Image (cartoon, helix red, strand yellow):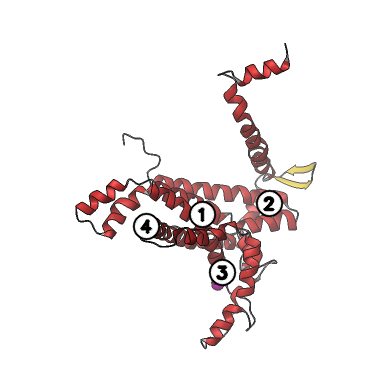
């Protein structure tokens, strides 16, 4: 049988064609996600001494994990995630509502201006932020404070101001993406609902709270889920401000702690254990918030 005719027959087969088309994605999932995840879980119970040398040590890596540095990293990630979500949900909704209004002039221009930071590398943007928030009196922000009679600040040597820098950088880059999600959601809301509300004499706030927000709920849940995931896996925003470790673990995040243990101290077993705990924390938080939003309820409930 000619191989060309055999392949053509398989591609046109209703039974085989679906499996052929999804096979690249299944292979990519197995090679780039499932295999590394399983290897990480196994390594978290081992002392890895080389590529082909490892010893099973049980829960020793997990017992060593819960020290002051891990708790500091967890605290930093948790505060960063909460502050980011407090900005990355209401601010993009506000942008989307304003830019979806026909009364707003220059909507395309403002959409581009708000979205462009999402295309910027975190390293490039972070270097710019470092220069603006530098410690010298001539740095942009300190120079502005000096004009206002406020003494210059050591932005990156204080936990609070350091956290503020990471939140501002992360929010500046991600707000445009969330705005696009909310714009897509707004444009799917039937205009007749607003027209009916206007006939009934509803105010602008009533239309927003009774029509817009409830119909944007699925997108709010999606951005909340992604925001939690992005907040706990944050690395670049920390690394670009503090290349080395800082006193009091300023800027230390969980992923950065993994990097320190696994690659700088060559303790892959410990790094794997931290990664598994991080996965468990993010999974648990997202399952709880999805449960609270009622996503596990059946249609009849």
For the residues labelled 2 and 1, the Cα–Cα distance comes to 34 Å
Label 1, on which residue? Answer: 177
Residue found at the very far bottom of the displayed protein: 149
For the residues labelled 1 and 3, the Cα–Cα distance comes to 20 Å
| Dot 2 crowding, Cα within 10 Å, few <14, some 14–19, many 20+ | many
First reached walking from the N terminus: tag 1 or tag 3: 3
For the residues labelled 4 and 2, the Cα–Cα distance comes to 52 Å
Specify the quadrant of the image occupied by residue 69.
Answer: bottom right
Residue range in magenta is 157-162
For the residues labelled 4 and 3, the Cα–Cα distance comes to 32 Å
Determine whether 223 is above or below 30 in the image.
Answer: below
Residue for point 64% across, 73% down:
131
Determine if residue 272 is in view: yes
Mark 4 or 3: in front is 4
- 57 or 123: nearer the eye? 123
Label 4, on which residue? Answer: 101
Answer left or right for 243 relative to 204: right
Decide whether residue 159 is among the magenta residues.
yes
Q: Secondary structure at mark 4?
A: loop
Answer left or right for 261 relative to 76: right
Label 2, on which residue? Answer: 270
Answer left or right for 237 relative to 92: right
Mark 2 or 1: in front is 1
- 249 or 294: nearer the eye? 294
Residue for point 65% across, 65% down:
240
Determine whether 129 is above or below 217 in the image.
Answer: below
- 288 or 31: nearer the eye? 31
């Amino acid at each position: 049988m000619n191989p060309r005719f055999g392949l053509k027959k398989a591609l046109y087969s209703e039974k085989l064609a679906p499996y052929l088309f999804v096979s690249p994605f299944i292979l990519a999932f197995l090679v780039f996600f499932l295999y590394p995840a399983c290897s990480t879980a196994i390594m978290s119970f081992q002392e890895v001494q080389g590529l082909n040398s490892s010893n099973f040590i049980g829960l020793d890596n997990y017992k060593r994990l819960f020290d002051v540095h891990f708790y500091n990293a967890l605290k930093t990630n948790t505060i960063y995630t909460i502050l980011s979500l407090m900005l990355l949900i209401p601010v993009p909704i506000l942008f989307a509502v304003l830019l979806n209004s026909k009364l707003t002039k220059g909507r395309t221009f403002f959409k581009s201006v708000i979205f462009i930071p999402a295309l910027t590398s975190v390293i490039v943007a972070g270097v710019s932020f470092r220069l603006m928030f530098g410690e010298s009196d001539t740095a942009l922000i300190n120079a502005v404070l000096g004009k206002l009679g406020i003494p210059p600040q050591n932005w990156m040597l204080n936990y609070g101001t350091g956290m503020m820098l990471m939140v501002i950088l992360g929010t500046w880059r991600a707000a445009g993406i969330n705005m696009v999600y909310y714009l897509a959601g707004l444009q799917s809301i039937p205009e007749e609902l607003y027209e009916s509300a206007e006939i009934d004499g509803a105010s602008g706030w009533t239309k927003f709270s009774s029509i817009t927000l409830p119909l944007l709920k699925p997108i709010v849940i999606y951005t909340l889920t992604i925001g939690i995931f992005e907040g706990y896996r944050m690395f670049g925003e920390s690394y670009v401000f503090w290349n080395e470790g800082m006193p009091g673990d300023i800027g230390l995040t969980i992923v950065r702690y993994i990097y320190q243990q696994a690659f700088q101290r060559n303790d892959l077993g410990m790094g794997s254990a931290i990664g598994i705990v991080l996965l468990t924390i993010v999974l648990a938080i997202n399952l709880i918030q999805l449960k609270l939003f009622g996503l596990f309820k059946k249609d009849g409930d």
